[in-house]
Structures are given as structure tokens and as C-alpha cells.
Image (cartoon, rainbow, N blue to C red):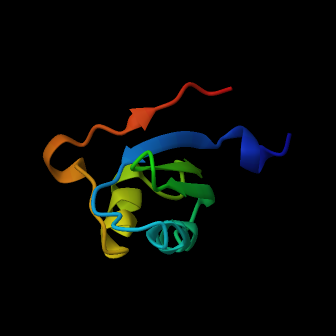
């Protein structure tokens, strides 16, 4: 495994405002454009987005800002409570 992947952290955000399945690529594009994002996958039916990122290059707050910039929202401002997943 490369050092890029070994320091990767998975995180899942609850996303509100995905009005249709066409929102998923938009959210994914916004997140993928952020420095340090290795993977991003939005789930319309589940109302969430899973991101794998490098914590030394970006933060959960920056990722939440990218979600909001895509035209949707997340509850990070009020209850910043992403679902952290254990490292595998």
C-alpha cells in the first residue's frame, strides 16, 4: 500500500437537500476537487456522502464546506457530527 493510501481517513456526512439523483455527481465533483480527497461517493437514497481524504491536506470542516458549496447542506455547523468509520 502506498503512503498516500495508508494515511487516508474515511468519513461519512449526512447530506440534506439532494432533491434528485442528478445531485450525486455534482456533490462528488465538488468534493473530488478538494486537495487531499482521494475518493468521494454520494448516496442519494441514503442521504449521505462518503469521502476518503488525507487529514494533513484537508479537514472535515473543509469537506463540509464543499458539500454546502454544491448547493446541498450538512449539519456540520450546528452539530458537526460526521460518522467516522474505523480504519481498515
Percent of width and height locating residue 84: 45, 32
Percent of width and height locating residue 4: 74, 50
Position of 46 with respect to 19 (left or right) is right
Percent of width and height locating residue 15: 34, 53
Residue under the image location 40 percent in, 68 percent down: 20
**In this rendering, is residue 33 above or below 59?**
below
Q: How many marks?
A: 0
Q: Say which quadrant the N terminus sits in.
A: top right
Of all residues shown, which one is farthest toward the left? 78
**Foreground residue among 40 and 22:** 22
**Foreground residue among 54 and 25:** 25
Q: Say which quadrant the C terminus sits in.
A: top right
Residue under the image location 42 percent in, 53 percent down: 59
Residue under the image location 18 percent in, 52 percent down: 77
Residue under the image location 46 percent in, 42 percent down: 12
Position of 70 with respect to 36 (left or right) is left
| Residue 72 position by quadrant | bottom left
| Residue 17 position by quadrant | bottom left
**In this rendering, is residue 43 above or below 30?**
above
**Foreground residue among 44 and 2:** 44
Percent of width and height locating residue 24: 50, 66
Amino acid at each position: 500500500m502506498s503512503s498516500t493510501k495508508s494515511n487516508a481517513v474515511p468519513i461519512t456526512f449526512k447530506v440534506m437537500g439532494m432533491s434528485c439523483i442528478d445531485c450525486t455527481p455534482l456533490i462528488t465533483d465538488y468534493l473530488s476537487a478538494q486537495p487531499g480527497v482521494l475518493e468521494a461517493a454520494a448516496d442519494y437514497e441514503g442521504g449521505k456522502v462518503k469521502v476518503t481524504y488525507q487529514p494533513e491536506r484537508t479537514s472535515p470542516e473543509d469537506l463540509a464546506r464543499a458539500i454546502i458549496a454544491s448547493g446541498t447542506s450538512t449539519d456540520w455547523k450546528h452539530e458537526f457530527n460526521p460518522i467516522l468509520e474505523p480504519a481498515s
